[in-house]
Amino acid sequence: MAVTLNKTPWHHHFIGLFLRFDGWLILAILFLAGLGLTAMYSAGFDHGARFDMHMRNMVLAACILFVVAQVPPSKIMLLAVPLYVVGVLLLFGVEFFGITRKGATRWVNVGLVIQPSEIMKIAAPLILAWWFQLRPAPFRTTDFIVAGVLLAVPVALILHQPDLGTSLLVLAAGLSVIFFAGLTWKLIIPPVVMAVLGIVLIVIYEPRLCQDGVDWVVLHSYQKTRVCTLLDPYNDPLGRGFHIIQGMIAIGSGGVWGKGFMAGTQTHLEFIPERTTDFIYAAFAEEFGLVGTSLLLVGFLFLVYRALMIATRARTLFGRLLAAAVGMIFFTYAFVNMGMVMGILPVVGVPLPFISYGGTAMVTLGLALGILMSVARDSAIKEPTLEFSGRATTKGR
């Protein structure tokens, strides 16, 4: 008897790689990427290589997203501990063998020069999601204390480099995992109240605190300068306050509809510093106005919304926490960058996702979105189990 084997056509395997991708998330990514390319084409008018490299970085990030999305969350969870350990060891390595650039020691040479703090943007939420996945519910106070220690170690090492911007991003990513794991408001409210009181006291006593010779114990001198510049940028309009002032002028001059594509005077006369990186939002606002920046904001909010929706559908606690953390990472990126350009937050060197130029940041975004898409694809798989009633359902926790 002859046996006939039905071989699946190759194109079916190829199509299968794209199945269960979250369509709305893809649309949000494409929308923001399109705005990013548009902004970079204008902001990088005097060096076209920036636009070409920005496009290549996006293609690289898309490839990373696609590859990581094929890996199930259960396999990603296996990388949590080794990635965290390697990241922390590299951060310690920076302390002893680090490379110093522009007064900051943030890089280490391990055959190639890398910035370990970038690893922790992914490793920190991974290790915390892994930790809570292993702990039995309901979580005890000690579980949250251990999570806090796991987060505090890399944040403290990054702050010591010093790198306030990256430490804030790592802290926000980690705290979002802890919050969504069920941290009680009793533990949330006290530090929030203390932070608000601290900000109020700084604003009230700014003239005294910002005097030369007054040291802030908890901050480096350059960080103190950034806070004081935020409170009064016109104290040094041609020096430390130049970035903030020019950013606000560009945003204000854009008005409602903007000056038009490639027509931004602040941008093309090179008044905006770092116009292709940290301050590209000011260049975008000048040319596209309130309408354009509103569309940009809607794009980011929709991406965060999709991340939270994916989190609610995740089949495991690990997937839920990780998806929610990715959403909050993008929210923090956008909030901090827009806030510092508009003069409501200190300048801390945080890029605007998809919009700002930067290869390392784009790779990190590709990894984060790949993890998010992995959770989305995993949640689309219906794995039947049997309840006591005999009805089919899908797995939880």
Image (tube, rainbow, N blue to C red):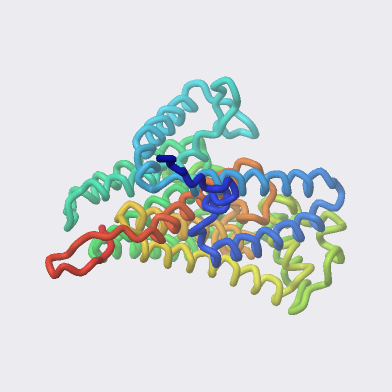
Q: Nearer the viewer, residue 324 or 334?
A: 324
Q: Kindly tell me whether residue 245 is visible in this rendering.
A: no
Residue 135 at x, y = what percent?
A: 20, 48
The residue depicted at 76 percent of the width and 60 percent of the height is 38
Where is residue 262, by image quadrant?
A: bottom right
Where is residue 339, by image quadrant?
A: bottom right
Quadrant of the rendering where the N terminus is positioned: top left
Q: Is residue 120 above or below residue 190?
A: above
Q: Is residue 378 above or below residue 115?
A: below
Quadrant of the rendering where the C terminus is positioned: bottom left
Left or right, 129 with respect to 99, comes to left
Q: Nearer the viewer, residue 34 or 253?
A: 34
Q: Nearer the viewer, residue 261 or 235?
A: 261
Among all residues in the image, which is located at the extreme front?
1
The residue depicted at 84 percent of the width and 46 percent of the height is 47
Report the label total: 0
Among all residues in the image, which is located at the extreme left?
388
Left or right, 370 with respect to 229, comes to left
Residue 128 at x, y = what percent?
A: 33, 47
The residue depicted at 57 percent of the width and 53 percent of the height is 15
Left or right, 183 with respect to 156, comes to left
Q: Is residue 105 above or below residue 253?
A: above
Residue 278 at x, y = what percent?
A: 66, 52
The residue depicted at 73 percent of the width and 50 percent of the height is 274
Residue 76 at x, y = what percent?
A: 40, 43
Q: Kindly tell me whether residue 336 is visible in this rendering.
A: yes
Left or right, 389 with respect to 11, comes to left
